[in-house]
Image (spheres, rainbow, N blue to C red):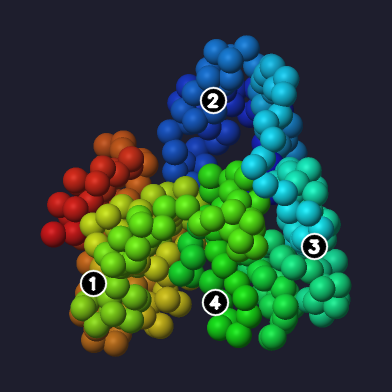
Amino acid sequence: KDNGKGMSNQQVDKLFTPFEQADNSIQRQYGGTGLGLSITNKLVGMMQGEIDCQSLEGVGSQFVVKLPLNAQQEVADFPFKLTEIKIAVVGDEDKFETDLNAHLTRLQANCEVIPRELFNAQLVDSQRYDYLIITAESFQQLTTEGKDVFIDGSRCHYILLDNNQDKLPKPSNVNISSLPLYPYYASKVSTHIAQLENIIAKENEDSRSLNSAMSLPSIKEAERLQELILVVEDNVYNQDLFKRQLATLGFQCVIADNGKIALQLLEQFDFALIISDCHMPVMDGYEFTKQRRIIEKQNNLPALPIIAATANALDGEEQICLACGMNDYLAKPILLQELNKKLK
């Protein structure tokens, strides 16, 4: 479901045809080839399912996929219970909080979903929850609305579901831990709580010790070494992939969801290189690059290397990237060897 530009009935009728888009402006503004929904329709059909689209121009579109799946006959028992542990989940109008609430309740936790629009940090703290679970999206939304999320000195342990765990501010005077939101598994959250409660042992102690010994440099250390990389990418899966690939190559990075945020981060950090997607909301990679080059020229700054990273592999895309001021080009999906070659 989205709140984009929406489509007419005539546009919806041809939506699942290969290489078709609702109108030509979509490719210019958002990119793409018109293959995504066609491929999705094929995959759904192979699974004996169906896909439906409802759309209103100027309002948005909703896609519903229905798949016939056999219900699991028996649900395996978990090796632990969270008996009487008091947990609050901040809802963000997603299926995840309903699923997580059911899972934690099944483990005998005292769990409650708090709608994001009704969230009040002081009231939550007065209820003396043991844990409060919140997604990065909800955290950012509440912060934008001027609401506090964390309470200094609270007994509550905050669990932030966030794939970009270096991006959000985390106060040092509250109990807080992070888990990657994607891929989402309710069992991942309950296992984390059970480990914090010492109900079960923490796993892979040896591998964690090895990882800590070979840990990445901090952001400040990466700045000092002139190795800090800015990744401008709006897709959370790609953000996580970039972080993993760069970490494998020994590089620390900071993530920006769009070009506007990237320009702000460039004022705060000393980056050595930028990897930027091309098609993003708010400010795309082309406009971001143009704005950055103007700032560099006006302030007599050295030109930072900017590598384009785009799923648009059509003829002419590389030339467009270079023409707007980018230095190099990577076609998605990005292979580790190719990324390493460009960084060298």
What element does badge 4 sit on? Answer: loop
Q: What residue type is labelled 4?
A: Pro
Q: In this view, does 130 lie to the left or right of 291?
A: right
Q: Which x, y percent locates residue 32?
A: 44, 38
Whether residues under marks 3 and 4 lie with C-beta atoms below 8 angstroms apart, the answer is no
Relative depth, front residue between 167 and 202: 202
Residue that numbered label 2 is attached to: 40
Which quarter of the figure has residue 99? top right
3 or 4: tag closer to the N-terminus: 3
The residue located at (60%, 72%) in the rendering is 176
Residue that numbered label 3 is attached to: 86
Q: What residue type is labelled 2?
A: Thr
Whether residues under marks 1 and 3 lie with C-beta atoms below 8 angstroms apart, the answer is no
3 or 2: tag closer to the N-terminus: 2
Please identify the quadrant where the C terminus is shown.
Answer: bottom left
| Real-space Cα separation, disc 2 to disc 4, in angstroms | 37 Å
Mark 2 crowdedness (10 Å alpha carbons): few <14, some 14-19, many ≥20: some
Q: Is residue 61 left or right of residue 209?
A: right
Residue that numbered label 1 is attached to: 227
Instruction: Select label 1 or label 3 by which is in front.
Output: 3
Q: Which amino acid does label 1 sit on?
A: Glu
| Real-space Cα separation, disc 1 to disc 4, in angstroms | 22 Å
What element does badge 2 sit on? Answer: helix
1 or 3: tag closer to the N-terminus: 3
Residue 39's place in the image compared with 163, above or below, is above
Residue 38's place in the image compared with 23, above or below, is above
Q: Which mark is residue 169?
A: 4
1 or 4: tag closer to the N-terminus: 4
Q: Which amino acid does label 3 sit on?
A: Lys
Please identify the quadrant where the N terminus is shown.
Answer: top right
Which quarter of the figure has residue 7? top right
Q: In this view, does 191 lie to the left or right of 278?
A: right
